[in-house]
Amino acid sequence: MSILEIDRRTELAERAYHIRRHALRMGEVQGQGYIGQALDIADVLAVAYFGAMRYRADDPGWEGRDRFLLSNGHYAIALYAALIEAGIIPADELETYGSDDSRLPMSGMAGYTPGMEMSGGSLGQGLAIAVGHALGLKRKGSSARVYTLFSDGELDEGSTWEGLMSAAHWKLDNMIAIVDVNNQQADGASSKVMAFEPLADKMQAFGWHTQRIDGNDLDAVIDAFDEAQRHARPRPRMIICDTRMGCGVPFLEAREKNHFIRVEPQEWQLALQALDAGYAGSNA
């Protein structure tokens, strides 16, 4: 690994750590939330925002920007953490999370938050909306890319599979989709609510360039985004990320059910301390 590659990885590891920390601090404001998801997807968001995407922090509506569409709107706390880290949202707004008149509602709302490209209250919509964005950008001759994140629970929805077919039909090589496979949704284990394996084979059969990785292995995430951007054939790209809910905070990872977490007041500081200790240990 070259010095430049080492420097890049070091920066992205630090960004992922900060994203997790921002999310925990927002969770503490409300005492509850979708913290497990924010911790599991932080590495992906760090690579997306600080290793792959083009945007201007001082001009979130810049026409030449890459778009990041959050289909799973309940992951908003994770995206807010990335937008804070990117300087698109001021850090002091973190304390307003989920409060009246806040720009950071608990579910993502495009009209409220700078950098939030779509409202994600209804699951299963994001991939189809991303197809529309990507097709529109192509027809305008734009070089911008569309990134979209959706959850394994959204594989229950027919609209997701319609989006998969449409993206391949239109050969949307300006589109990179990420599915977070943490095997949890509100009704239980995602794979038991609606079996979706072999997922990579299905994505490939639908015409997508597909990679499957450990979404909490930062090196694997970096390599996957690089490969998705380099892939030359005119077709959309899919990164399937197997992740661990609560990643980075061992006692949250160990919880049997952590789709929506309620954390005791004293546990928030314990969570931050565990995160800090893990990050310090990884850099020792």
Image (cartoon, rainbow, N blue to C red):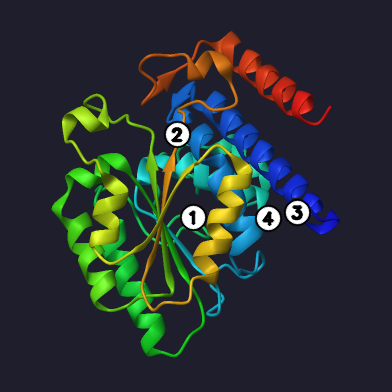
| Residue 37: mark in rendering | 2
Residue drawn at point x = 55 percent, y = 73 percent: 65
Q: In this view, does 140 lie to the left or right of 57?
A: left
On the image, the x and y values in percent for residue 251 come to 54, 13
Q: Is residue 268 left or right of residue 5?
A: left
Comparing 37 with 192, the one in front is: 192
Vertical position of residue 275 compared to residue 37: above or below: above
Label 2, residues with CA under 10 Å away: few <14, some 14-19, many ≥20: many
On the image, the x and y values in percent for residue 23 come to 57, 34
Question: Which comes before the other along the chain, label 2 or label 3?
Answer: 3
Q: How far apart are marks 4 and 2 (CA)?
A: 22 Å
- Label 4: which residue? 87
Q: Do the residues labelled 1 and 3 touch (CB within 8 Å)?
A: no
- Label 3: which residue? 8
Q: What residue type is labelled 3?
A: Arg
Question: Which comes before the other along the chain, label 3 or label 4?
Answer: 3
Q: Do the residues labelled 1 and 4 touch (CB within 8 Å)?
A: no
On the image, the x and y values in percent for residue 33 come to 43, 28
Q: Distance between the residues labelled 2 and 1?
A: 20 Å
- Label 1: which residue? 113
Mark 2 or 3, closer to the camera: 3
Helix, strand or loop at label 3? It is helix
Q: Which amino acid does label 1 sit on?
A: Thr
Q: Can residue 113 be seen in this view?
A: yes
Q: Can residue 83 be seen in this view?
A: no
Rendered image quadrant of residue 180:
top left
Mark 2 or 1, closer to the camera: 2
Q: Distance between the residues labelled 3 and 4?
A: 19 Å
Helix, strand or loop at label 1? It is loop
Tell me how many marks there are.
Answer: 4
